[in-house]
């Protein structure tokens, strides 16, 4: 199961999992884009996907999803759903906006794990991959809620790994760097407006921080998820996929 599977990274992860032979349950808040993801999978000749609506920040919605999928053996959970939050100095951020980011990016991971881990524990196997970010590992001004939430996901991951690893379940986080797509396009446009530069200048300056001199592509993140699932000894790890944006 992949959360936030209707577009962007969630769709790319779903497609790469399907290409690897996984039957994907694509979940998200809106059915129409999820149906499009399923159509892409089916038209590519991969295992037929199932779609299901959920708001990961809503405990009742997550519980309803769990009940509706009682006939499915969910052995892989990819917690991808997330929101970028405000782009603003910390002192100008409202508590409501701060909480909205943590509700999805952190509490959403907690709620999905709480709902779908028990059957994995009963079967004695399963894999959980939580999408974190390189944001927070390096300065990213005006993005405090997002950075803080993604670092919280890493902490959640390592602690959960200690709890369920002995029960046969692997838990890891994947921390992508900036990925080409509409979200980064919006960020570059806002940065250009703020600094008086062009969006392309803002993009080039940002990409120059990566040792490969470029941003990631969505498919690369999907391939990384598949690769992590093919590494049975990978556990309690946070994997940087940043084109060298973060080097450790």
Image: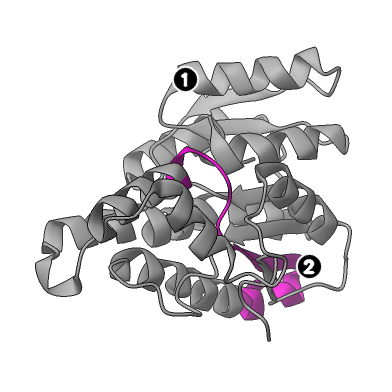
- Taking the spot 75% from the left edge, 56% from the top edge, the residue there is 126
Q: Quadrant of the N terminus?
A: top right
Q: Residues within 10 Å of mark 1 (few under 14, many from 20)?
A: some
Q: Is residue 181 above or below residue 239?
A: above
Of callouts 2 and 1, which one flags the residue occurring earlier in the amino acid sequence? 1
Q: Nearer the viewer, residue 248 or 44?
A: 248
Q: Is residue 8 left or right of residue 230?
A: left
The colour mode here is one colour
Q: Nearer the viewer, residue 22 or 149?
A: 149
Mark on residue 31?
A: 1
Q: Quadrant of the C terminus?
A: bottom right
Horizontal and vertical percent for residue 109? 48, 57
- Residue 142 among magenta residues: no
Q: Residue furthest bottom?
A: 248
Q: Is residue 90 left or right of residue 120?
A: left
Q: Is residue 73 above or below residue 156?
A: above
> Which element is circle 2 on?
loop
Res. 64 image quadrant: top left
Answer whether residue 116 is visible to the viewer in this image: yes
- Taking the spot 47% from the left edge, 70% from the top edge, the residue there is 135
Q: Is residue 123 left or right of residue 35?
A: right
Q: Is residue 233 above or below residue 117?
A: below
- Residue 172 among magenta residues: yes
Picture mark count: 2
Q: Nearer the viewer, residue 68 or 189?
A: 189
Horizontal and vertical percent for residue 167? 74, 70
- Taking the spot 27% from the left edge, 60% from the top edge, the residue there is 195
What is the magenta range?
161-184
> Which element is circle 1 on?
helix
Mark on residue 168?
A: 2
Horizontal and vertical percent for residue 246? 62, 77
- Taking the spot 62% from the left edge, 23% from the top edge, the residue there is 37
């Amino acid at each position: 199961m992949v959360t936030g599977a209707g577009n962007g990274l969630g769709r790319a992860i779903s497609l790469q999992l399907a290409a690897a032979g996984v039957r994907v349950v694509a979940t998200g808040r809106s059915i129409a884009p999820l149906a499009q993801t399923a159509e892409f999978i089916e038209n590519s000749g991969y295992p037929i996907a199932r779609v299901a609506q959920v708001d990961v920040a809503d405990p009742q919605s997550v519980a309803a999803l769990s009940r509706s999928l009682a006939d499915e053996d969910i052995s892989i959970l990819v917690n991808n759903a997330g929101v970028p939050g405000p782009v603003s100095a910390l002192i100008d951020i409202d508590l409501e906006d701060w909480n909205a980011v943590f509700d999805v990016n952190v509490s959403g991971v907690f709620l999905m794990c709480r709902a779908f881990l028990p059957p994995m524990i009963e079967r004695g196997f399963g894999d959980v991959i939580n999408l974190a970010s390189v944001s927070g590992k390096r300065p990213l001004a005006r993005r405090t809620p997002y950075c803080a939430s993604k670092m919280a996901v890493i902490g959640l991951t390592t602690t959960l790994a200690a709890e369920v690893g002995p029960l046969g379940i692997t838990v890891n986080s994947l921390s992508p760097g900036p990925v080409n797509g509409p979200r980064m396009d919006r960020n570059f446009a806002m940065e250009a407006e703020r600094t008086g530069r062009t969006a392309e200048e803002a993009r080039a300056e940002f990409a120059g921080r990566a040792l490969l001199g470029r941003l990631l592509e969505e498919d690369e993140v999907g391939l990384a998820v598949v690769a992590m699932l093919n590494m049975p000894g990978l556990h309690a790890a946070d994997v940087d996929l940043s084109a060298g944006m973060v080097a450790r």
